[in-house]
Image (cartoon, rainbow, N blue to C red):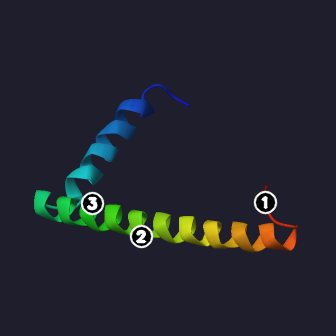
Amino acid sequence: MNLSTIPQFFKEAYAELRKATWLSRKEVIGSTVVIIILVMIMAMYVSFTDFVLSIFVGSLLGGTR
């Protein structure tokens, strides 16, 4: 890699970033809230499923002490 290509890379990367469309603050906050809610729902689902399956497997293996 030639050292003269490094500044060119950063110039081109900056030019591409200028072309990108960025979300507004309101859109970012809304998306973040949705993701947090979905993660919480999935965590509850996985926890419930784990609890039910642990009871089921425990009963198959002779119960718990």
The answer to whether residue 59 is left or right of residue 47 is right
Q: Earlier in the sequence, mark 1 or mark 2?
A: 2
Residue 35 in the image, given as x and y percentages of width and height? 34, 64
Residue lying at 87% horizontally and 67% vertically, measured from the top left: 62
In the rendered image, residue 57, in percent from the top left (x then y), is placed at: 79, 70
Mark 2 Cα shell of 10 Å, populated few (<14), some (14-19), many (≥20) = few
Three-letter amino acid code at disc 2?
Ile
Asked where in the image residue 20 lies, by quadrant, the reply is: bottom left
* Marking on residue 19: none
- Residue 62's place in the image compared with 4, above or below, is below
Q: How many marks?
A: 3
The residue tagged 2 is 41
Marks 1 and 2, Cα distance to the nearest angstrom?
A: 29 Å
- Screen quadrant of the C terminus: bottom right
**Residue 22 appearing in the image:** no
Q: Quick check: 13 above or below 26?
A: above
Q: Amino acid at mark 3?
A: Thr
Read off the residue under disc 3.
32
For disc 1, the marked residue is: 64
Label 3 CA crowd tier, 10 Å (few <14, some 14–19, many 20+):
few
What amino acid type is highlighted by mark number 1? Answer: Thr
> Which numbered mark, 1 or 3, is in the foreground of this view?
1
Task: Give the label, 1 or 2, closer to the camera.
Answer: 1
Gap in angstroms between the C-alphas marked 3 and 2? 14 Å
Q: Position of residue 51 (x, y in %)?
A: 62, 66
Q: Where is residue 28 shown, x and y percent of the image?
A: 21, 60
- Going by the image, does 42 lie left or right of 18? right
